[in-house]
Amino acid sequence: MPDDDPIRELGRWIDRARDAGAPHPASVAFVTVGDGGRPSARTVTLKRLEDDALVFTSALWTRKAQEIEANPEVALLFHWPSLGRQVHVTGEAAFAERALAEELFSQRDLLHQLQTVVSRQGEPIDDLDPLRSRLAHLAEVQETAPACPEDWGALRVRPRTAEFWDEAPDRLHERRLFERRDSGGWRVGLLSP
């Protein structure tokens, strides 16, 4: 039986994808709005679900972070082709408190922490070799995990809508739409396939 809360239902769908062996079950296309209203997309990993938000991390100098700062409206698309399922979320992104960024940074694998220190994601470079050399050196000599960089953060996306699409052999796919009510809670309905 489907849940009446889209965030809990999303958690169930991610768990099902993980249990089914889907690769990267928490990966999601994360779409922001760039200059002139142009969409800008990238694939990221959902870090956690909260009661009213989806949580992600980002370096604060990236195009994604700059676009969220200018326009917090975002869209997300989870897709599990092997299960014939996808979830499309729209909502507003906001940067979270520093403590959450530090907590999530500390949960990253050491190599991922070091990569964050070594590479300014998205900035132009001439060659990957110096970055690889520096990363290898740090991995060899680093005795403790690095502190969370000041320019690395967490963000929350509070969904406004969430559409759950479940493939059907007869092409009459189930499309369940959750819309956040101004008064709280969710309005749930079906869309024609």
Image (cartoon, grey):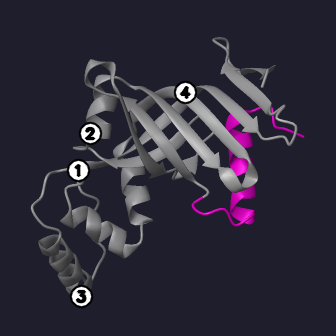
Point out the frontmost of discs 3 and 1. Answer: 1
Label 1: state its secondary structure.
loop
Q: Residues within 10 Å of mark 4 (few under 14, many from 20)?
A: some
Q: Which residue is mark 2?
A: 63
Does residue 88 sit above or below 79 in this rendering? Answer: above
Q: Along the horizontal axis of the image, is 138 left or right of 111?
A: left
Question: Residue 119 in the image: x percent, y percent?
Answer: 20, 62
Cα distance between the residues tagged 3 and 1: 25 Å
Provide the residue designation for mark 1.
122
Q: Is residue 59 left or right of residue 27?
A: left
Give the amino acid type for the residue marked by disc 4 in the picture: Thr
Q: What amino acid type should be assigned to the residue bearing mark 2?
A: Arg
Kindly check if marks 4 and 2 are in contact, taking CB atoms under 8 A apart as contact.
no
Q: Which circle's residue, 4 or 1, is located before the other in the chain? A: 4
Task: Judge whether 96 appears above or below 21 on screen.
Answer: above
Which numbered disc flags the more N-terminal residue, 3 or 4?
4
Picture residue at 76% right of the left edge, 29% below the top: 175
Tags 2 and 3 touching, CB below 8 Å: no
Q: Quadrant of the C terminus?
A: top right
Q: Which residue is mark 4?
A: 90
Indicate which disc, 2 or 1, sits on the residue closer to the N terminus: 2
Inter-mark Cα distance, 2 to 1? 7 Å
Q: How many marks?
A: 4
Q: Which residues are magenta?
A: 1-24
Q: Residues within 10 Å of mark 2 (few under 14, many from 20)?
A: some
> Is the C-beta separation of discs 2 and 1 under 8 Å?
yes
